[in-house]
Amino acid sequence: MGGLMHWLLASPLLLFVAWAWIDLFAHYSPLPNYWLDALLGLLLMAGVVVLPLGVAAFWLVTSFPGLFQHVGWDVQPLEPVRETEAYWVRYV
């Protein structure tokens, strides 16, 4: 349920950014139909902004597990580890 709460907290900001992005896209688009502009703007925002930033955040967090110990993603060690060796494990 932790991930759902993060999305609920972020949703007002995401909705505002999507609304601003759609309005800018519709303003500068040569197409006469606003709803087509809105659909294209949302698809472009998802492909250019939301998905790459989500993948980049996942890559950053899994690259530095010591800095981000409580982010909600489980990082698995490459081999079985005893509890006494936990601080010397190499994560990929």
Image (cartoon, grey):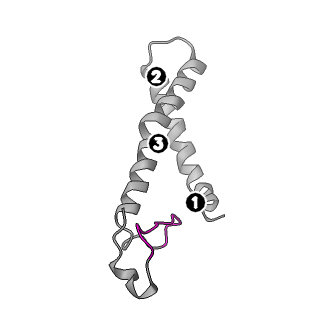
Residue, disc 2: 27
Find residue 38 and report its image quarter. Answer: top right
Q: Position of residue 4 (x, y in %)?
A: 64, 58
Q: Is mark 3 in CB contact (under 8 Å) with mark 1? A: no
User: Which of disc 1 and disc 3 is earlier in sequence?
Assistant: 1
Q: Secondary structure at mark 2?
A: helix
Q: Is residue 42 above or below residue 66?
A: above
Distance from label 2 to label 1 (Cα)? Answer: 31 Å
Task: Report the span colored magenta.
Answer: 70-80
Which three-letter amino acid code belongs to the residue tagged 1? Answer: His
How crowded is the residue under tag 3: few (<14 C-alpha within 10 Å), some, or many (20+)?
few
User: Exactly how many numbered labels are in the figure?
Assistant: 3
Residue bearing mark 3: 51
The percent position of residue 35, horizontal first and vertical second, equals: 60, 20
Left or right: 20 as drawn, with respect to 67: right
Label 1 neighbour load within 10 Å: few <14, some 14-19, many 20+: few
Q: Position of residue 70 (x, y in %)?
A: 49, 72
Query: In what quadrant of the picture does the N terminus appear?
Result: bottom right
> In the rendered structure, which disc, 3 or 2, sits on the residue that comes first in sequence?
2
Mark 2 residue type: His
Mark 1, secondary structure of its residue: helix
| Vertical position of residue 88 compared to residue 17: above or below | below
Q: Which residue is mark 1?
A: 6
Residue shown at 43%/48% (left/top)? 55
The kind of residue tagged 3 is Leu
Q: Residue furthest front?
A: 80
Q: Main secondary structure of the magenta part?
A: loop
Q: Looking at the image, is mark 3 or mark 2 nearer the viewer?
A: 3
- Rendered residue at 59%/58% (across/down): 9
